[in-house]
Image (cartoon, helix red, strand yellow):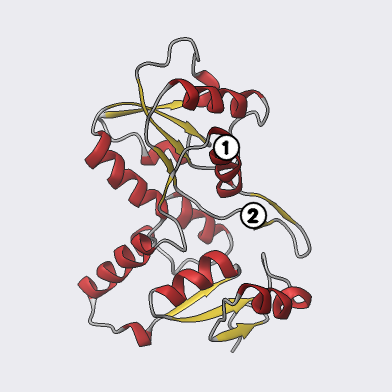
């Protein structure tokens, strides 16, 4: 619901909540099936924690976690780059994972996200990677370029109408998540140059990464 409302505030009223499939939904499905019940600690905002609050799972922000009383925590989820103190709560996260051998889910794998035409900010995927390297544990990722999200979306679309992969275009601003994920799933891909990948860097990044989009577009905005 919050994602749909964010589009509405931008004037895109055609996108409804039922049109949006997020990696948070896959994280919720995993927690429901594998963890089932108990306390799930999270990094993020209270709104983002709606994916955890399923009735049998209790979300607990890292900021409220008592590191000396954490035996009841059954999982940890990286949800959002806001809603916590970057020093105190990230240190607490590391120490939680040193004390508890629990599943760790990353619901958004983007390392950065654009905040203006020329600047980006650290995203929760980048924070998760930093913590993962620090504790030496393997986290579970549901965002792009992992195939689970594409399979989930493709199955959902085909449940509504028959569609083939060659009829779908994956549009994104990041080579290593959006474009790589679309390429791996067999979709045509369009790299837009208004976010993480800037026009002046595009050719060099494509050449060095070997990740080749089907199309390159200056913007995702369609004009008539």
In the foreground, 19 or 214: 214
In the foreground, 210 or 153: 210
Q: Are marks 2 and 1 in contact (CB under 8 Å)?
A: no
**Residue 2 visible, this angle:** yes
Distance from the alpha carbon under mark 2 to that under mark 1: 15 Å
Q: Residues within 10 Å of mark 2 (few under 14, many from 20)?
A: some
> Looking at the picture, how far across and down is residue 179, in whole percent?
52, 73
**Residue for point 37% across, 16% down:** 71
Q: Quadrant of the C terminus?
A: bottom right
Q: Is residue 143 above or below residue 124?
A: below
Q: Secondary structure at mark 2?
A: strand
> Looking at the picture, how far across and down is residue 146, in whole percent?
41, 61
* Mark before the other along the chain sequence, 2 or 1: 2
Q: Is residue 203 above or below residue 67?
A: below
**Residue for point 40% across, 49% down:** 24
Q: Which residue is mark 2?
A: 112
Find residue 131 and name its label.
1
> Looking at the picture, how far across and down is residue 97, in whole percent?
48, 27
Q: Secondary structure at mark 1?
A: helix
Q: Residue furthest top?
A: 68
Q: Is residue 69 above or below residue 74?
A: above
Count of numbered labels shown in the rendering: 2
In the foreground, 28 or 13: 28
**Residue 220 visible, this angle:** no
**Residue for point 68% across, 27% down:** 87
Using residue 198 as the reference point, say whether residue 158 is left or right of it: left
> Looking at the picture, how far across and down is residue 192, in whole percent?
62, 76
Of tags 2 and 1, the one toward the viewer is: 1
């Amino acid at each position: 619901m919050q994602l749909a409302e964010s589009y509405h505030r931008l004037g895109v009223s055609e996108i409804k909540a039922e049109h949006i499939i997020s990696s948070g939904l896959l994280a919720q499905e995993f927690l429901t099936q594998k963890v089932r019940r108990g306390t799930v600690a999270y990094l993020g905002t209270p709104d983002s924690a709606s994916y955890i609050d399923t009735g049998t799972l209790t979300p607990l922000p890292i900021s409220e976690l008592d590191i000396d009383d954490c035996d009841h925590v059954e999982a940890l989820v990286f949800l959002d780059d806001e809603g916590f103190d970057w020093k105190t709560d990230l240190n607490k996260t590391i120490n939680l994972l040193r004390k508890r051998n629990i599943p760790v889910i990353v619901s958004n794998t983007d390392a950065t996200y654009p905040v203006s035409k020329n600047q980006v900010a650290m995203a929760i995927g980048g924070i998760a990677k930093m913590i993962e390297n620090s504790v030496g544990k393997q986290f579970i990722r549901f965002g792009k370029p992992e195939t689970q999200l594409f399979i989930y979306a493709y199955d959902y679309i085909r449940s509504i109408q028959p569609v083939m992969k060659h009829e779908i275009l994956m549009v994104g601003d990041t080579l290593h998540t959006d474009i790589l994920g679309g390429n791996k799933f067999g979709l045509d891909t369009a790299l837009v140059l208004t976010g993480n990948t800037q026009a002046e860097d595009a050719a060099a990044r494509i050449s060095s990464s070997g990740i080749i989009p089907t199309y390159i577009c200056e913007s995702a905005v369609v004009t008539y």
